Amino acid sequence: MSKTLLVMRHAKSSWTDESLADHDRPLNKRGRNAAPRMGQLIREQGIVPDHVACSSATRARMTAELVAEACGYAGSIQLLRELYLAPPGAYVEAAQRIDSEPERVLVVGHNPGITQLVCELAHADEVMPTGALALIELPIRRWTELDFGVCGNLVRLWRPRELG
């Protein structure tokens, strides 16, 4: 038995409105195009999540919503303030608290925590640019078993610029 963790960095955000707090920055045009493309990829690959947890930041929420719509995810998106600019441990703790036992969970957040999460869980040396999606298979039966002692397998890493 295993679980699948989809790890996504929010899509490209806008810096045009300098009056906005960092937490409130939206996606720019490139981000609004890339996020649904990643959602289509999720649908095409047959890896639609059973649960989505996301940073409460506007750019992460917008990314998660566009991905969810494009991939056909019908559930709610769990917005978590503690995932805003979070270290990798915060993502692990969020996964450990999932009430049900979904097989596939998508987390959407920020660097450097997202890249560190992928590197630590999959023992990989990768970089997660904006909009990137990693698929990690975890040898666990329940999300409560997830910790950094688990040796996950990075099955695939997709970057928006590579999709065309």
Image (cartoon, helix red, strand yellow):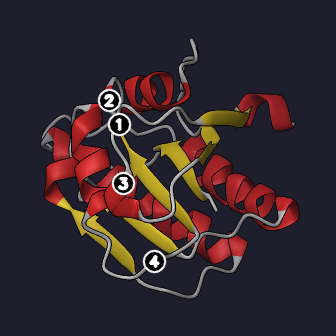
Mark 1 Cα shell of 10 Å, populated few (<14), some (14-19), many (≥20): many
Q: State the image coordinates of residue 78 (x, y, percent, origin top left).
A: 32, 72
Amino acid marked by disc 3: Glu
Amino acid marked by disc 2: Gly
Name the image quarter holding the N terminus: bottom right
Q: What element carries label 3?
A: helix
Report how many numbered discs are placed on residues in the image: 4
Amino acid marked by disc 1: His
Mark 3 Cα shell of 10 Å, populated few (<14), some (14-19), many (≥20): some
Labels 1 and 3: the sequence-earlier one? 1
Q: Are marks 1 and 3 in contact (CB under 8 Å)?
A: no
Per the image, the residue denoted by label 3 is 145
Closer to the camera: disc 4 or disc 3? Answer: 3
Amino acid marked by disc 4: Glu
Per the image, the residue denoted by label 2 is 113
Labels 4 and 2: the sequence-earlier one? 4
Identify the residue at image location x=49%, y=37%: 12
Q: Is residue 25 visible?
A: no
Q: In this view, does 105 lie above or below 92?
A: below
Mark 4 Cα shell of 10 Å, populated few (<14), some (14-19), many (≥20): some
Labels 4 and 3: the sequence-earlier one? 4
Q: Do the residues labelled 1 and 2 touch (CB within 8 Å)?
A: yes
Identify the residue at image location x=62%, y=39%: 134
Q: State the image coordinates of residue 123 (x, y, percent, origin top left).
A: 53, 20
Per the image, the residue denoted by label 4 is 101
Q: Is residue 119 visible?
A: yes
Per the image, the residue denoted by label 1 is 110
Closer to the camera: disc 4 or disc 1? Answer: 4
Residue sitting farthest toward the bottom? 74
CA gap, disc 4 and disc 3? 12 Å
Residue sitting farthest toward the top? 125
